[in-house]
Image (tube, coloured by chain):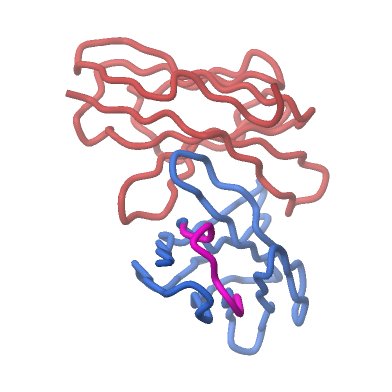
Amino acid sequence: GNSVTQMEGPVTLSEEAFLTINCTYTATGYPSLFWYVQYPGEGLQLLLKATKADDKGSNKGFEATYRKETTSFHLEKGSVQVSDSAVYFCALTYTSGTYKYIFGTGTRLKVLA
Amino acid sequence: ETGVTQTPRHLVMGMTNKKSLKCEQHLGHNAMYWYKQSAKKPLELMFVYSLEERVENNSVPSRFSPECPNSSHLFLHLHTLQPEDSALYLCASSQEGAAKETQYFGPGTRLLVL
């Protein structure tokens, strides 16, 4: 079946460090891939997305590339800030009669000043 | 108000109580969702409504009862819950024209069942 696996956290980094959060997926067909972010006390909000192979999603300095050959969608940022501390969710969508969204377990990021 | 709002933000209830969670979307979307978020687990999709009709019910216990009176409002009625039902309940909406649209989430209701 379809699934999303992302690295377990928490991830703790110093400000201005490089960030990678790994995400791999299993899916039939051609899913769209997403990264959502959840700040403390808030709901999830879309960070970036990619809808086909080799697409790169980017937003607020974060990037992720849809790699079909490795079934991956790793999240990266060159220089993290304290304000990036949050929980990050990798997700995919596909259709199978109805609309399906599958989320990973989330990775908590803590950035220290 | 803009986006997706949820009330109440926090709820404590006993196992014999009946309560309801409310979600309202101000985005003109035609699909709404309830999710359960528990620690160290993936988000669990509970219910999906598209054009006010329930199109998904992921084996959720009958003590959870959804209601979608119109495309802007979604309720989750709760009765005789168990302590393991304590979690963050998230509502989301999307515009289902294509199958891969972005979902917009509310801030959630933090539920504690005693």
Q: Evaluate whether residue A105 shows in this view.
A: yes
The correct choice, above or below, for B20 with respect to B110 in the image is above
Q: Which chain is blue?
A: A
Seen as rendered, the residue at the extreme front is A113
Q: Is residue A112 magenta?
A: no
- Front one among B110 and B44: B110
Q: Which region is colored magenta? A: A77-85
Quarter of the figure with the C terminus of chain B:
top left
Please state which of residues A55 and A44 is positioned toward the viewer in this rendering: A44
| Residue B94 horizontal/vertical position (percent) | 71, 39
Colour applied to chain B:
red
Query: As drawn, is B10 to the left or to the right of B2?
Result: left
At 44% across and 39% down in the image, what residue appears? A41
* Residue A101 in the image: above or below residue B20: below
Q: Is residue A84 above or below residue B105?
A: below
Report the residue at 20% width, 16% height from top: B14
Q: Quadrant of residue B79?
A: top left
Report the front residue among A22 and B34: A22
Which x, y percent locates residue A33?
Answer: 65, 66
Q: Is residue A73 visible?
A: no
Q: Residue at x 52, y 18 (%)?
A: B22
Image quadrant where one finds the N terminus of chain B = top right
> At x 36% / y 18%, what residue is drawn?
B78
Residue A101 position, x and y percent, is 58, 53
Q: In the rendered view, would you say B24 is above or below A7? A: above
Q: From the viewer's perspective, tell me whether residue A17 is left or right of residue A94.
A: left
Q: Is residue A84 magenta?
A: yes
Residue B87 vs residue B22: left or right? left
